Image (cartoon, helix red, strand yellow):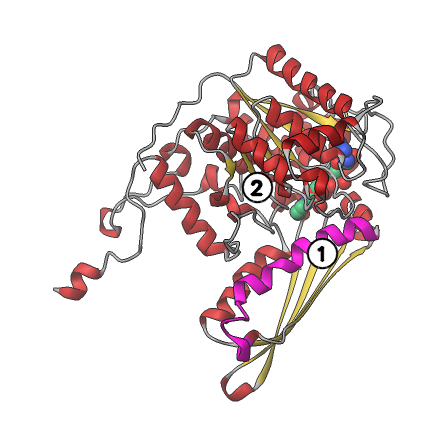
Amino acid sequence: MHTTVKKPEGKLGVLLVGMSGAVSTTFLAGTLAVRKGVGLPIGSLTQMGTIRLGKRADNNFPKIKDFVPLYDLKNLIFGGWDIRDENSYESAKIAEVLKDKDLDLVKDELEQLRPFKAVFDKKYVARLDGTYVKSDTTKAGLMEQVREDIRNFRKDNNLADIITIWCGSTETYLKASEVHDTIESFEEGMKNNHPDISPSMLYAWACLMENVPYFNGAPNLTLDIKAVQQLALKNGIPIAGKDFKTGQTMVKTVIAPMLKTRMLGLDGWFSTNILGNRDGEVLDDPGSFKTKEESKLSVIDSILQPELYPELYGNVYHKVRINYYPPRKDNKEGWDNIDLFGWLGYPMQLKIDFLCRDSILAAPLVLDLVLLGNLSQRVGFSGIQEWLSFYFKSPQHSEGIVPEHDLFIQNIKMKNTLREIMNEEPITHLDDKITLFK
Ligand SMILES: NC(=O)c1ccc[n+]([C@@H]2O[C@H](COP(=O)([O-])OP(=O)(O)OC[C@H]3O[C@@H](n4cnc5c(N)ncnc54)[C@H](O)[C@@H]3O)[C@@H](O)[C@H]2O)c1
């Protein structure tokens, strides 16, 4: 593949659905602090990561942001939607992730940011009540209002590009149905207020109609339906999801490949989480929890391939629990108990207790997805961006292909895609070959 990348010129608009939430406000405050030179973008591969070029002996490791043409942080303009009418400084205070001393460094900038009214329906997020919401007689009308927001945002800020990231709440569990099958059936469904069309789908549709890539940080069905995927391909727009891979699943996608690489067996994996933020409250509803559970459960089977290794992984008991526990706020505890077995079947146990901070882990992923998602569009990629699987708990993939969950394989895949984009040789890690055969 020989690619030419359109250089970033002008400003990139970043639209966040759920702009007043914990992840969004932590991302906003952090990105503003980094560009002011008062914070470090820890956890962001695009800002801190390097990429090896050529042979190991060449010793050439530029920073990713110096290697691929990404928008500079100073050229990002922020906007978004939420169901609450607060500026981003007020929302960040309510989210209680960052300390006042950190928020105050970017108070003026945060106070300038205020969401557009949301498309919201309590039917899809039972634990929330929206007051700052759009109204219309049809879902088609609501979708058109979102398109208008996007057009105004583009015009008012004179933007060259826009990207949208869903950082909103997890919607109730929905299954793909006939209305999701084609562009025509979906358009008809919006006009008839079909119940299987959720607000997140209306945002995605509006974005794809306005030439805006849409990335899904929650486990919502949004981008998995055929109609949305067809529209993305028809209009030549990148999409990717779903569900940011932050705490427990990040750990899982490192430990499970370790067991498999060493051919160690697994009897059971019990994962439990306690968290006390608004996301935890939303996930306390059985409908929203089911959506999250499906996303978290998908990981182990596809890494361990029980069909190839029935003696090792043919009978794994995998359980995931999430409990709302207000005292912990955004500081989640993700606890894993792993029952494994080794030589001649002798049992062992591994326990992991990750005292993490949910939004601190998610914010750098939002930044990377903003920059790399926009890069995809400038390169001319469209449809599902499998090369960005690294960022997702339940990565989307082409039909007939199993998803790649292993964090390090995902990382290699992403870096090799960046090399391809810049017309550099992919790295196979075989450069010792020459010495071996001498
Ligand atoms: N933080 C993590 O580690 C992590 C990891 C993976 C996925 N996620 C997902 O990211 C999402 C955001 O997490 P959070 O902790 O910021 O939650 P949050 O509850 O703090 O924020 C969600 C925001 O979305 C808004 N919202 C809900 N429905 C909306 C709609 N239809 N339109 C516009 N705004 C809407 C809410 O008002 C809220 O401000 C959740 O779905 C969560 O499951 C988070």
Q: Is residue 108 above or below residue 103?
A: above
Quadrant assignment, res 22: top right
- Residue position marked by numbered label 2 in the rendering: 365
- Dot 1 crowding, Cα within 10 Å, few <14, some 14–19, many 20+: some
Q: At 51% across and 88% down in the image, what residue appears? A: 344
Q: Is-magenta flag for residue 425?
A: no
Pick whichever of labels 2 and 1 is earlier in the sequence: 1
Q: Is-magenta flag for residue 296?
A: yes
Q: Is the residue marked 1 within 8 Å of ligand 1, measured from its CB? A: no
Ligand 1 resides in the quarter of the picture at top right
- Tell me the SS state at disc 1: helix
Residue type, numbered disc 2: Leu
The residues colored magenta run 286-312
Q: Nearer the viewer, residue 208 or 78?
A: 208
**Extreme-bottom residue of the structure:** 344
Give the Cα separation between the discs numbered 2 and 1.
Answer: 21 Å
Q: Which percent across, then down, holds residue 404?
A: 50, 55
Q: Is residue 248 visible?
A: yes
Q: Is residue 348 above or below residue 110?
A: below
Quadrant assignment, res 362: top right
- As drawn, is 283 to the left or to the right of 150? right
Q: Main secondary structure of the magenta part?
A: helix
Q: At 64% across and 41% down in the image, what residue appears? A: 225
- As drawn, is 369 to the left or to the right of 166? left
- Residue position marked by numbered label 1 in the rendering: 293
Q: Is residue 328 above or below residue 383?
A: below
Q: Which percent across, then down, holds residue 243?
A: 64, 46
- As drawn, is 311 to the left or to the right of 419? right
Q: How many marks?
A: 2
Q: Is residue 96 visible?
A: no
Quarter of the rendering occupied by the N terminus: top left
- The circle drawn on residue 174 is none
